[in-house]
Image: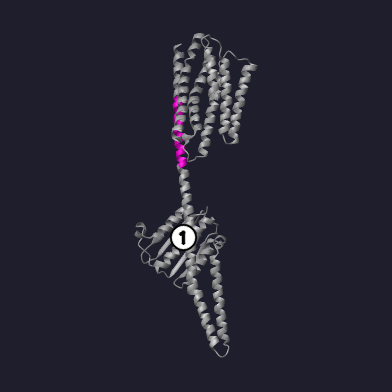
Amino acid sequence: MDNLSQGITIVVGVAISLAIVAIGIISLFLNYRNKRLQAIQETEKMQAAFNQQLLQSQLEMQEHTSNMISAEIHDNVGQILSLAKVQLNLIDQGETLDRTLLADAKESVSKAMTDLRDIAKSLNSERIKLSSLQEITELELQRVNRLGLMITSLKTNGETKNLQEQKKLIIFRIIQESLQNIIKHSKAKKIEICFHYEKDILRIEVADNGTGFDKTLLEKKEGLGLQNIISRALVIGGEANINSVPGQGTVITIISPYE
Amino acid sequence: MYYFVAAILMFLASFKVLPQIDNIREYDLLLLSGSIFISIYFFLIFETRSKKGFAIFILILGSLNFIKREFIFHQYSSFDSFGFYMFSLFTIIMVFMYFNQVLKAVSDKSIFLNFDFWINVAFLIYHLGSFVIFLSLYALSVLVYRWEDRLSIGNLWAGQNILLFVSAICINTGVVWIIYHRE
């Protein structure tokens, strides 16, 4: 009888202990749920940052393209057409028809037409979607080349792999920003871009032989353009490293996963 | 609805205690109504077919157990502790299924404003504790033969009542919490 009473007490004790365990399980459940909620909110924030960055990149690219087109029309097409106008004036003033001059005028107009066609192509937003990252980078380098300030080159290592549309756009914007920085500040004579298609990541190096800069600029957050490059790379799940030595140029390395 | 039916059955059962009339049938009906209402409740809150299927399985099992006891074996004399034990065990499984469902679709909305959460918390506290009591009741009813000893087994209900009280507090806290925070 005593043993039975003892047994019953133990059973009641175990039952109440299990009820306490149930409270523990509920606490664990709530804790795990909170963690999941935080993780989801974090992901949503990242997604929002990514979308914002994407939108900003698109707007900046449009602005950049507009500026480049404006410069090209003014400096290139405008000059060629002015030359064609002078040539036509000379033909008009001459007593006899100068066939050589006429051919030159025709060539100038033809060149202006080709340049305008190139500009029209660059205005097409579908161009970026349809072209590969190398192709649009190549076109960008051709534009820089036309400025006549520096020599550019593009190299590719490894087998080309496709990138996500949005990632491609942001990486291209990083390259554009890097080139803009080089043109504005570096006084470089040579720009070299190299695409390394590795197993899981794409590594892009943008190197110049310009004046370089003190890396403390980055720590002081004075180089906002450079900070932009770093933050954009983070948004696409990659990273950007900037190595520069005063007097010895700069190398910007962009690393991005394919997915 | 379940609690209403359960209260009526317990009320009827309590009337039979003093005149020492057998009230096993009320408990059998309580188990049957518990199986039906709780299975339907979980069937309604579950979102996947497999989980809904499990709730229907419990409903069928509870009904078959009742049919077996009442109409096939006519087991009116003994309390169906094993049936209650199985019912508690399956309810615990369904509570975990509910928690799994909540964790799969986490939302910003506070879970404390969801009455289902409070009901499941009460179910877990009550059934996790009580399944041990029902199992012990079943084991002791098999092992103990002396009538005086059998009477002392009834002391196990003290633990059961404590658990029932705690789970009732949980549900009431949920009701108050939801009303207060909605205001």
Q: Which amino acid does label 1 sit on?
A: Ile
Q: Position of residue B14 (x, y in %)?
A: 52, 14
**Magenta span of residues:** A17-37
Q: Position of residue B96 (x, y in %)?
A: 52, 32
Residue A237 shows in the view:
no
Q: Does the magenta stretch include residue A36?
A: yes
Task: Residue at 49%, 77% (x, y): give it.
Answer: A79
Residue A61 shows in the view:
yes
Image mark 1: chain:
A
Q: Main secondary structure of the magenta part?
A: helix
Q: Mark 1 points at which residue?
A: A174
Q: Is mark 1 on a helix, strand or loop?
A: helix
Task: Residue at 53%, 83% (x, y): give it.
Answer: A87
Q: Where is residue B168 in the image (x, y as percent from the top left)?
A: 47, 25
Q: Where is residue A253 in the image (x, y as percent from the top left)?
A: 44, 59
Image position of B142 with respect to A254: above or below:
above
Q: Is residue B177 magenta?
A: no
Q: Quick one: B79 or A155, which is closer to the camera?
A: B79
Q: Quick one: A102 or B80, which is closer to the camera?
A: A102
Task: Residue at 52%, 30% (x, y): give it.
Answer: B95
The single residue placed furthest to the front in the displayed view is B183
The single residue placed furthest to the right in the displayed view is B72
Alpha-carbon neighbours of circle 1 within 10 Å: few (<14), some, or many (≥20)? many
Task: Residue at 50%, 32% (x, y): give it.
Answer: B115
A246 displayed left or right of A190: left
Q: Quick one: A133 or A165, which is closer to the camera?
A: A165
Image position of B152 with respect to B124: above or below:
above
Looking at the picture, the colour scheme in use is one colour
Q: Quick one: B58 or A3, which is closer to the camera?
A: B58
